[in-house]
Amino acid sequence: MSMIADLKDDELATYLANHLSDYEFEMLVRKRIERMFIGVEQRHEELGSSHHMCRFTYAWDDESTWRVAVGSTYRDVVEHTGQVLSISLANVERQWYEQKENKLSLLLPAPKSGFEE
């Protein structure tokens, strides 16, 4: 186990790629993505996890991309594509929030009920 602690960056990634079982690899990737999306949900309670999306496209020339999306409904889903998952998710979160906050209805007073006079 001490050998793993001595490895850094690409060496550690190569070691894990060669020594993790398929199950361990799948669970590692899934848990990491889940943790990142849970962080977004905690910051924006109105987001629904059923509207999240995360796709990875591997390219041999090191131009692989992540495509992520968040939203509270099917109508307000925002997508972003980038090469780094955490940055792509931060960008799509920021874009979703900016679009959500850029509405005239947020500046208008609440409608009056028929009981107020």
Image (tube, rainbow, N blue to C red):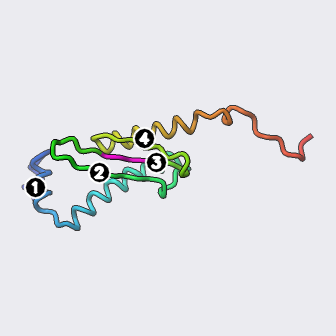
Question: Are the residues tagged 4 and 3 within 8 Å (C-beta)?
Answer: yes
Cα–Cα gap, marks 1 and 4: 32 Å
- The x, y position of residue 10, in whole percent, is 12, 46
- The x, y position of residue 19, in whole percent, is 11, 62
Cα–Cα gap, marks 4 and 3: 7 Å
First-in-chain label (1 vs 4): 1
Magenta segment, prevailing SS (helix, strand or loop): strand
Label 4 sits on a secondary structure element that is helix
Question: Are the residues tagged 2 and 3 within 8 Å (C-beta)?
Answer: no
Residue drawn 50% across the image and 47% down it = 77
The front one of 36 and 108 is 108
For badge 1, the amino acid type reads Tyr
Residue drawn 45% across the image and 41% down it = 93
Question: Are the residues tagged 4 and 2 within 8 Å (C-beta)?
Answer: no
| Residue at the extreme right | 117
Is label 3 or label 1 in front?
3
- Disc 2 marks which residue? 56
Crowding at dot 1, Cα within 10 Å, few <14 / some 14-19 / many 20+, comes out as few
- Disc 4 marks which residue? 92
The front one of 94 and 55 is 55
Residue drawn 51% across the image and 54% down it = 48
- The x, y position of residue 95, in whole percent, is 47, 37
Label 2 sits on a secondary structure element that is strand
- Disc 3 marks which residue? 70
Crowding at dot 4, Cα within 10 Å, few <14 / some 14-19 / many 20+, comes out as many
- Disc 1 marks which residue? 15
For badge 3, the amino acid type reads Val
Cα–Cα gap, marks 3 and 1: 33 Å
Q: Quadrant where the C terminus lies?
A: top right
First-in-chain label (4 vs 2): 2
Which region is colored magenta?
66-70
